[in-house]
Image (cartoon, grey):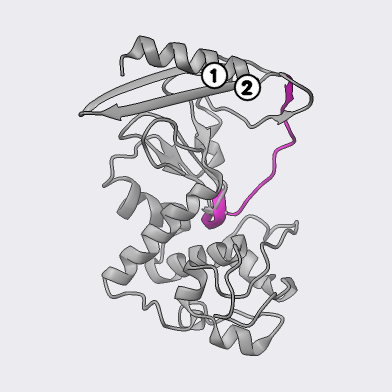
Amino acid sequence: MRRGELSTFVEVTTEEFGITGACVGVLMDGQEACASHGVTNLDHPQPVDDHTLFHLASVTKTFTAAALTRLVAEGRVELDAPVRRYVPELELADGRAAERITVLNLLNHTAGLEWNLVFTGDEADTLAGFVAHLPQLPLIAPPGTRASCSQAGYNLLGRITETVTGLSFEKAMDQPLLEPAGLTNTFFGLDEITVRRFAVGHTPRRPRRAAAPRPAVGLLAGGRARQQPRRGRGRGHRPGGSAPRPGPGRVLTSS
């Protein structure tokens, strides 16, 4: 696909659906085409370009899972091991569940954990602090009996990554995963994101109108990361899902 054709498609489509800003990339036969249209933020608009960072949200879970399974391949984590082997301080509302949940249960969303736990305070932005508050999280099923998407489970996977590697989640993602993949413009830290051009999400209000919502903070492993849409660039910001979303053809992007 030629860049001119792609640019026309992106412009027409974003206008048709009232999209504030978008960047699209296509990789075909070894050739990359990238096109963008719109602005990063209706309140403080800057043109979206090929280097604009987008929020990855729950796509970050893919990165969290990749980092964890790399530790499995290295023999440092066992999928069938109880989570308490790596996070001995884990406590849940049901003590039996805390003993039984395995690493694999967290990876495939069968741990029986409710979707997420939201709280405020000094511990709200650390994975260790998140784990300390897990006794408040409702359990929806015994471990291994049903599948239900859980941001909390991936934040717990992020904590496993920290305890096994001895690194912060961000560094544990950056050094063994993002850097080898060449994702040099994907970020987990807000301090790294705010000094770069980044897009924010918008909520539709009425046809062809949108408004920027108030920001919500998500823990790393479950979902926070930002990435520019071009190939070979990227870095993330949370285990379960808060991360800038890849534009054209690159994986970022935690919850």
Q: Secondary structure at mark 1?
A: helix
> Residue 155: which quarter of the image?
bottom right
How packed mark 1 is, by other alpha carbons closer than 10 Å (few <14, some 14-19, many 20 or more), is some
Pointer 2 with pointer 1, Cβ within 8 A: yes
| Dot 2 amino acid type | Phe
Could you say where residue 118 lies in the image, as x and y percent from the top left? Answer: 73, 58
**Which residue is located at x 54 percent, y 49 percent?**
58
| Residue named by callout 1 | 13
Q: Along the horizontal axis of the image, is 190 left or right of 78?
A: right
Q: Where 23 falls versus 171 (above or below)?
A: above
Estimate the spatial distance between the alpha carbons at disc 2 and disc 1, rounded to whole Å.
6 Å
Q: Residue at x 28, y 24 (%)?
A: 32
Q: Position of residue 180 (x, y in %)?
A: 26, 47
Splitting the image into 4 quarters, where does residue 156 fall? bottom right
Give the residue pinned by disc 2.
17
Left/right placement of residue 133 relative to residue 72 reads: right
Question: 109 and 227: which one is in front?
Answer: 109
Span of residues in magenta: 209-223
Place of residue 141 in the rendered image (x, y in percent of width and height, measured from the top left): 66, 78
Numbered label tally: 2
Secondary structure mainly formed by the magenta segment = loop
Q: Looking at the image, which residue sits at the far bottom?
A: 96
Crowdedness near tag 2: few (<14), some (14–19) or many (≥20) residues, C-alpha within 10 Å: few
Element carrying mark 2: helix
Task: Name the residue nearer the viewer: 113 or 141.
Answer: 141
Q: Amino acid at mark 1?
A: Thr
